[in-house]
Image (spheres, grey):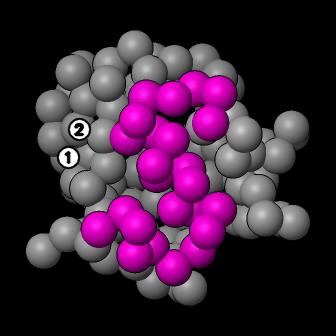
Amino acid sequence: MTIPVEQLSDPAVRAFVVALNDNDQAAFFGTLTPDATMSDDGSDRDLRDWTEREVFSSNGFMEVEEETDGGRALVVTYRNDTWGAMRTAWRFTVDGGKISRFETGQA
């Protein structure tokens, strides 16, 4: 069962998922602190390069299956045109209402 995006508990994470699913780069980067960082499968990545490749140019989309940690940890079915669909875990660090770090990897 999926959780409707508008029901996600944390407002910063909810805005992140909405922007990602809308493929809205301006709104997406607006959810992040200026110095935000990220990792994929335990390795730090260049956030702009990674999101361009894994999200924006490949039509990334998140269907949220569950949330924990007050909405700052998600398990989602993530799909894009490059890899198809896969079950992934996402953890978010929120600072002052914006995301300062997110970590993703296979769930």
Along the line of sight, the residue nearer the viewer: 3 or 83: 3
- The stretch drawn in magenta includes residue 80: no
- Give the SS element for disc 1: strand
Question: Which quarter of the rendering shows the N terminus?
Answer: bottom left
Query: Is any atom of residue 37 visible in this view?
Result: no
* Residue 30 position (above or below residue 106): above
Residue count near mark 2 (Cα–Cα under 10 Å), binned few <14, some 14–19, many ≥20: many
Mark 1 closeness class: few <14, some 14–19, many ≥20 residues within 10 Å:
some
**Image point 68% across, 35% down: which residue?**
29
Tell me where residue 88 appears, x and y as whole percent: 32, 55
Q: What residue type is labelled 2?
A: Arg
Residue 13 visible in the snapshot: yes
Residue that mark 1 sits on: 86
In this rendered view, identify the residue nearer to me: 88 or 44: 88
Amino acid on which the number 1 mark rests in the picture? Met
Residue, x 44% and y 73% (percent of image)? 8
| Residue 79 numbered tag | 2
Above or below, 3 against 62 in this view is below
Queried whether the magenta region covers residue 24, the answer comes back as yes
Q: Please give the range of residues in magenta.
A: 4-27
Question: Residue 70, relative to residue 46: is it above or below?
Answer: below
Seen from this angle, which residue lies furthest front? 6
